[in-house]
Image (cartoon, grey):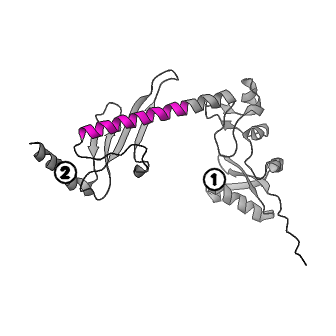
Amino acid sequence: MMKKPRHKKPPLAWTVQETDDRTGGIVFTRYRSERARADAIRKGARLDYGEAYYLEACRTRWADRYAPGPVPHSAMVAEGWWFDCAGCGMRIDSDAMWEHKLDWRGVIGAGDGYTYCCAKCRADDIAMRASRKAAESAALADMRRQALAALPGVWCAPIDAKKWNGRAHAYVTRKGADEPWVTEQATVPFDFPGRKIGYGTFGFHKLGEAPRASVCNGDLAAWEAHLKNHQERAA
Protein backbone atom coordinates (compact mmCIF):
# COMPACT_ATOMS: atom_id res chain seq x y z
CA MET A 1 0.00 0.00 0.00
CA MET A 2 1.41 3.34 -1.08
CA LYS A 3 1.63 6.14 1.42
CA LYS A 4 -0.35 9.22 0.48
CA PRO A 5 1.88 12.24 -0.20
CA ARG A 6 1.73 14.96 2.41
CA HIS A 7 0.67 18.33 1.04
CA LYS A 8 2.61 21.17 2.55
CA LYS A 9 0.60 24.02 3.96
CA PRO A 10 0.95 27.22 1.93
CA PRO A 11 3.16 29.86 3.53
CA LEU A 12 1.33 32.79 5.09
CA ALA A 13 2.41 36.42 5.20
CA TRP A 14 3.35 38.19 8.42
CA THR A 15 4.32 41.80 8.98
CA VAL A 16 7.37 42.13 11.25
CA GLN A 17 8.12 45.59 12.66
CA GLU A 18 10.37 47.21 15.22
CA THR A 19 8.23 48.27 18.15
CA ASP A 20 9.54 51.86 18.37
CA ASP A 21 10.26 53.20 14.88
CA ARG A 22 7.86 50.80 13.10
CA THR A 23 10.38 49.83 10.41
CA GLY A 24 10.33 46.28 9.10
CA GLY A 25 8.96 44.16 6.30
CA ILE A 26 6.85 41.17 5.31
CA VAL A 27 8.01 37.57 5.71
CA PHE A 28 6.39 34.20 5.04
CA THR A 29 6.15 31.12 7.22
CA ARG A 30 4.44 27.73 6.95
CA TYR A 31 3.93 27.53 10.69
CA ARG A 32 0.63 28.33 12.31
CA SER A 33 -0.53 29.99 15.53
CA GLU A 34 2.10 31.27 18.00
CA ARG A 35 4.82 29.17 16.41
CA ALA A 36 4.26 31.16 13.21
CA ARG A 37 4.63 34.42 15.11
CA ALA A 38 7.93 33.29 16.63
CA ASP A 39 9.22 32.11 13.25
CA ALA A 40 8.26 35.41 11.61
CA ILE A 41 10.12 37.38 14.28
CA ARG A 42 13.17 35.14 13.90
CA LYS A 43 13.18 35.76 10.14
CA GLY A 44 12.75 39.49 10.69
CA ALA A 45 15.77 39.56 13.01
CA ARG A 46 17.78 37.65 10.40
CA LEU A 47 16.85 40.33 7.84
CA ASP A 48 18.10 43.08 10.20
CA TYR A 49 14.66 44.50 10.94
CA GLY A 50 15.85 44.76 14.54
CA GLU A 51 16.72 42.70 17.61
CA ALA A 52 14.23 39.88 18.13
CA TYR A 53 13.05 41.16 21.51
CA TYR A 54 12.21 44.56 19.94
CA LEU A 55 10.15 43.06 17.10
CA GLU A 56 6.47 42.29 16.85
CA ALA A 57 4.59 40.31 14.21
CA CYS A 58 1.01 40.23 12.93
CA ARG A 59 -0.79 38.43 10.13
CA THR A 60 -0.94 40.19 6.77
CA ARG A 61 -3.60 38.35 4.82
CA TRP A 62 -3.62 40.60 1.77
CA ALA A 63 0.02 39.58 1.05
CA ASP A 64 -0.66 35.82 1.11
CA ARG A 65 -1.08 35.85 -2.69
CA TYR A 66 2.59 36.82 -3.06
CA ALA A 67 3.88 33.71 -1.26
CA PRO A 68 6.63 32.68 -0.93
CA GLY A 69 7.74 36.28 -1.49
CA PRO A 70 9.11 38.82 -1.92
CA VAL A 71 6.18 41.21 -1.87
CA PRO A 72 6.30 43.96 -4.55
CA HIS A 73 6.82 47.39 -3.04
CA SER A 74 4.08 48.78 -5.27
CA ALA A 75 1.55 46.53 -3.54
CA MET A 76 2.89 47.54 -0.15
CA VAL A 77 2.54 51.25 -1.01
CA ALA A 78 -1.08 50.60 -2.00
CA GLU A 79 -1.60 49.08 1.46
CA GLY A 80 -0.17 52.06 3.34
CA TRP A 81 3.56 51.30 3.51
CA TRP A 82 6.15 53.91 2.55
CA PHE A 83 9.73 53.79 1.25
CA ASP A 84 12.54 56.18 0.33
CA CYS A 85 13.38 56.25 -3.37
CA ALA A 86 16.94 55.01 -3.90
CA GLY A 87 17.26 57.41 -6.81
CA CYS A 88 15.78 60.84 -6.07
CA GLY A 89 15.26 60.28 -2.34
CA MET A 90 11.58 61.23 -2.26
CA ARG A 91 9.27 59.54 0.21
CA ILE A 92 7.21 56.99 -1.66
CA ASP A 93 3.70 56.76 -0.27
CA SER A 94 0.23 57.11 -1.76
CA ASP A 95 0.05 60.86 -1.01
CA ALA A 96 3.49 61.66 -2.42
CA MET A 97 2.84 59.62 -5.54
CA TRP A 98 -0.38 61.58 -6.13
CA GLU A 99 1.36 64.93 -5.54
CA HIS A 100 4.09 64.05 -8.06
CA LYS A 101 1.52 62.70 -10.54
CA LEU A 102 3.05 59.23 -10.40
CA ASP A 103 1.20 55.93 -10.50
CA TRP A 104 1.81 53.73 -7.46
CA ARG A 105 1.74 50.75 -9.82
CA GLY A 106 4.97 52.09 -11.35
CA VAL A 107 6.90 51.75 -8.09
CA ILE A 108 9.84 49.39 -8.65
CA GLY A 109 11.27 47.12 -5.98
CA ALA A 110 10.53 44.05 -3.88
CA GLY A 111 11.66 42.48 -0.64
CA ASP A 112 14.83 44.05 0.77
CA GLY A 113 16.05 45.44 -2.56
CA TYR A 114 16.20 49.05 -3.70
CA THR A 115 12.95 50.94 -4.18
CA TYR A 116 12.36 53.44 -6.99
CA CYS A 117 9.45 55.79 -7.56
CA CYS A 118 9.48 55.17 -11.33
CA ALA A 119 11.43 53.49 -14.14
CA LYS A 120 13.28 56.71 -15.08
CA CYS A 121 14.55 57.14 -11.53
CA ARG A 122 15.81 53.55 -11.55
CA ALA A 123 17.60 54.02 -14.90
CA ASP A 124 19.23 57.27 -13.71
CA ASP A 125 20.38 55.63 -10.48
CA ILE A 126 21.84 52.61 -12.28
CA ALA A 127 23.74 54.95 -14.61
CA MET A 128 25.02 57.00 -11.64
CA ARG A 129 26.23 53.90 -9.79
CA ALA A 130 28.03 52.65 -12.90
CA SER A 131 29.67 56.05 -13.38
CA ARG A 132 30.76 56.16 -9.73
CA LYS A 133 32.17 52.63 -9.94
CA ALA A 134 34.18 53.58 -13.03
CA ALA A 135 35.53 56.69 -11.26
CA GLU A 136 36.53 54.64 -8.21
CA SER A 137 38.31 52.08 -10.41
CA ALA A 138 40.18 54.84 -12.23
CA ALA A 139 41.23 56.42 -8.92
CA LEU A 140 42.54 53.09 -7.63
CA ALA A 141 44.41 52.36 -10.86
CA ASP A 142 46.07 55.79 -10.65
CA MET A 143 46.99 55.23 -6.99
CA ARG A 144 48.51 51.86 -7.90
CA ARG A 145 50.70 53.54 -10.54
CA GLN A 146 51.81 56.12 -7.98
CA ALA A 147 52.62 53.40 -5.43
CA LEU A 148 54.79 51.49 -7.89
CA ALA A 149 56.58 54.69 -8.88
CA ALA A 150 57.12 56.00 -5.32
CA LEU A 151 57.93 52.81 -3.41
CA PRO A 152 61.05 50.89 -4.46
CA GLY A 153 60.84 47.13 -4.84
CA VAL A 154 57.21 46.69 -3.81
CA TRP A 155 54.68 44.45 -5.47
CA CYS A 156 51.18 45.77 -6.13
CA ALA A 157 48.76 43.49 -7.94
CA PRO A 158 46.00 44.79 -10.22
CA ILE A 159 43.27 46.34 -8.09
CA ASP A 160 40.63 43.79 -9.08
CA ALA A 161 42.82 40.83 -8.09
CA LYS A 162 41.13 38.44 -5.64
CA LYS A 163 44.34 38.44 -3.60
CA TRP A 164 43.53 41.86 -2.14
CA ASN A 165 40.06 40.75 -0.97
CA GLY A 166 38.62 44.27 -0.85
CA ARG A 167 41.68 45.94 0.71
CA ALA A 168 41.78 48.58 -2.03
CA HIS A 169 39.45 51.49 -1.24
CA ALA A 170 38.29 54.64 -3.02
CA TYR A 171 35.64 57.22 -2.19
CA VAL A 172 34.51 59.70 -4.83
CA THR A 173 31.90 62.48 -4.76
CA ARG A 174 30.46 65.04 -7.13
CA LYS A 175 28.31 68.12 -6.71
CA GLY A 176 25.90 67.41 -9.54
CA ALA A 177 25.04 64.93 -12.25
CA ASP A 178 27.00 66.95 -14.84
CA GLU A 179 30.01 67.57 -12.59
CA PRO A 180 33.18 65.43 -12.59
CA TRP A 181 33.84 62.94 -9.79
CA VAL A 182 36.38 64.08 -7.18
CA THR A 183 38.47 61.51 -5.30
CA GLU A 184 38.35 62.19 -1.56
CA GLN A 185 39.94 58.91 -0.43
CA ALA A 186 42.06 56.30 -2.19
CA THR A 187 44.29 53.59 -0.74
CA VAL A 188 45.85 50.51 -2.31
CA PRO A 189 47.68 47.59 -0.66
CA PHE A 190 51.22 46.57 -1.48
CA ASP A 191 53.58 43.75 -0.56
CA PHE A 192 57.31 43.84 0.06
CA PRO A 193 60.13 41.42 0.93
CA GLY A 194 60.22 40.43 4.61
CA ARG A 195 56.56 41.25 5.24
CA LYS A 196 55.07 38.76 7.73
CA ILE A 197 51.90 40.22 9.26
CA GLY A 198 49.87 42.49 6.99
CA TYR A 199 50.06 44.24 3.64
CA GLY A 200 51.18 47.84 3.58
CA THR A 201 48.91 50.57 2.23
CA PHE A 202 49.62 53.58 0.05
CA GLY A 203 47.24 56.48 -0.42
CA PHE A 204 45.41 59.32 1.31
CA HIS A 205 42.31 59.62 3.49
CA LYS A 206 41.44 63.31 3.08
CA LEU A 207 41.12 65.50 0.02
CA GLY A 208 44.32 67.49 -0.44
CA GLU A 209 46.59 65.08 1.43
CA ALA A 210 49.70 63.76 -0.28
CA PRO A 211 49.75 59.95 -0.68
CA ARG A 212 51.95 58.14 1.80
CA ALA A 213 52.94 54.59 2.69
CA SER A 214 51.91 52.90 5.92
CA VAL A 215 52.78 49.49 7.39
CA CYS A 216 51.75 47.84 10.65
CA ASN A 217 54.08 48.02 13.66
CA GLY A 218 54.89 44.32 13.43
CA ASP A 219 56.33 44.80 9.91
CA LEU A 220 57.93 48.20 10.50
CA ALA A 221 61.44 46.80 11.04
CA ALA A 222 61.19 44.72 7.86
CA TRP A 223 59.93 47.74 5.90
CA GLU A 224 62.76 49.97 7.15
CA ALA A 225 65.30 47.25 6.33
CA HIS A 226 63.79 46.96 2.83
CA LEU A 227 64.09 50.72 2.23
CA LYS A 228 67.65 50.80 3.59
CA ASN A 229 68.64 47.95 1.30
CA HIS A 230 67.36 49.84 -1.74
CA GLN A 231 69.08 53.03 -0.65
CA GLU A 232 72.40 51.20 -0.36
CA ARG A 233 71.95 49.66 -3.80
CA ALA A 234 71.19 53.06 -5.32
CA ALA A 235 74.28 54.68 -3.70
Q: What separation in Å lies between label 1 and label 2 (alpha carbons)?
A: 48 Å
* Residue denoted by label 2: 226
Majority SS type along the magenta span? helix
Q: Callout 1: helix, strand or loop?
A: loop
Q: Looking at the picture, which amino acid does disc 1 mark?
A: Leu
In the displayed structure image, the side of residue 3 where residue 226 appears, left or right? left
Of all residues, the one furthest to the left in this rendering is 235
Residue drawn at the location 47% of the way across and 22% of the way down: 179
Q: Position of residue 140 (x, y in %)?
A: 39, 37
The magenta stretch spans residue 41: no
Compared to residue 7, the image places residue 180 above or below, namely above
Residue 185 visible in the shown view: no
Residue 116 visible in the shown view: yes
Residue drawn at the location 18% of the way across and 47% of the way down: 227
**Between residues 207 and 55, which one lies in front from this camera angle?**
207
Compared to residue 193, the image places residue 103 above or below, namely above
Question: N-terminal of the two: label 1 or label 2?
Answer: 1
Residue 199, label in figure: none
Q: What crowding class fits label 1: few (fewer than 14 Cα within 10 Å), some (14-19), or many (20 or more)? A: few
**Between residues 23 and 76, which one lies in front from this camera angle?**
76
Residue drawn at the location 23% of the way across and 46% of the way down: 153
Residue 47, label in figure: 1
Q: Callout 2: helix, strand or loop?
A: helix
- On-image quarter of the C terminus: top left
- On-image quarter of the N terminus: bottom right
In the displayed structure image, the side of residue 132 where residue 56 appears, left or right? right
Q: Which residues are magenta?
A: 128-150
